[in-house]
Every structure is written in C-alpha cells, then in structure tokens.
Amino acid sequence: MSIVTIRNVEFLNNPARFLDPYHFRVTFECIAQLPEDLEWRLIYVSSPGNEELDQELDDCLVGPVPAGINAFEFEGSAPNPAKIPPEDVLGVAALILTGSYKDQEFVRVGYYQNTEYDNEEMKETPPESIRFERLVRDINTKPRVTRFQIKWDIAPQHQNGQAVAAGAATSAAVPSANDLDMEDVQPTNGSS
C-alpha cells in the first residue's frame, strides 16, 4: 500500500474544445502527514512512438499534505498545436497525470482522449489544413492507473497496533466519485 492513494479524478470540463485548458479535481488519501510537497504533472501524448513529442502541459505542487482525504483543483494548458504532427491531431491521444514525492514518481494515471471536428460535415470531409478552433476533445473517464514503489522516508500511521505497509507496484482503475464520501474531503492548496 502506498502512503498516497488517488481516490478520484474528475474532469470539470469534459468534453471541451481542443484549445480549452484542462480543468479537473483530484481527490486522494494520505495515510501519513507528508512534510514535503507532492508534485503533479499533466502530460499530453500525441505520438506514442515518439516521446520527444510529449508535451508537459502544466505541473503543480501540493503541500504540506495532512493525513486523511485531500483534494485540489488543477488547470493545465491545452497542447501546443505546432508540436503535434498533423497526422496525429485527429483520433486518439493520451493524457497522463503523474504524482511524485521527492522526485520519485509514485503514480501514473493515463486517459485516452478522442479529438474530432465539432460537426458532421467536417468529420466526414476534414479540411486539408487542420482547423484547431473547430476541434473538440472527449476524455474517456476510465483510466489506467499504475503505482510505483518509492522510498517515502516517513512512518505511516498505525492501525490496531500494526504498522501500515507503504509501497506498491500494481495497476487498477480509479474509483468513481460515487464511491467517495464527499463530507470527508479536505481541500489542500495547490499552486502552479
């Protein structure tokens, strides 16, 4: 088990125009107070075979983080159209949210994003040059979550006299917002 577990990622503007910023709320549980900030990064992957084309859209630091349920809102810029090969603009791309502690990535949440024109005529007969102002994006809300074992350098809280184990290397889906008791959510300040 990791010290930090994502409970929910809610996209607040989905679907949206391709050029609109990404706006979402992350809810996570922390089983021990973290003295250092958590770093969150948002990455757009247009060409899976070429990492050089990945775009870091934004990052933010959240902390210090108290034990319990925490949440923050994150806004990331839209991808730079000039950095996307024309053949990779339409169709499926990936959006990745990463979480790190002391420069160690402990979680990676990946989403598929579909990009298409906003009307049937342009979908059926796309213009020769891409008209980004007419594109819309739709993010699939069923993510793929990968957790990484890291060195937390903190002692987790004890439950029933037993230490809670820290660290994991598994993949699973993020629970839906319906699984959360929103009265337990404590906003945490984040800054870009």
Image (spheres, rainbow, N blue to C red):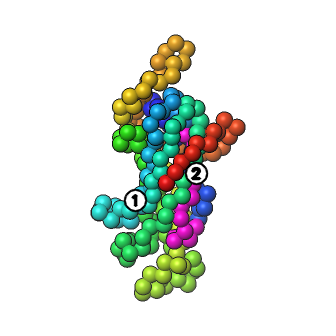
Q: Which residues are magenta?
A: 16-28
Res 95 seen here? no
In the picture of the structure, the residue carrying the numbered disc 2 is 73
Q: Residue furthest top?
A: 161
Residue in the foreground of this view, choosing between 179 and 84: 84
The correct choice, above or below, for 176 with respect to 22 in the image is above
Q: Is residue 2 left or right of residue 16?
A: left
The correct choice, above or below, for 99 with respect to 67 in the image is below
Instruction: Residue 111: say if magenta.
Output: no
- Amino acid type for the residue under numbered disc 1: Glu
- Amino acid type for the residue under numbered disc 2: Glu
Question: Horizontal and vertical percent for residue 122?
Answer: 52, 83
In the picture of the structure, the residue carrying the numbered disc 1 is 56
Instruction: Residue 24: say if magenta.
Output: yes
Label of residue 4 in the image: none
Residue in the foreground of this view, choosing between 13 and 138: 13
Question: Horizontal and vertical percent for residue 1?
Answer: 45, 30
Identify the mark nearer the N-term, 2 or 1.
Answer: 1
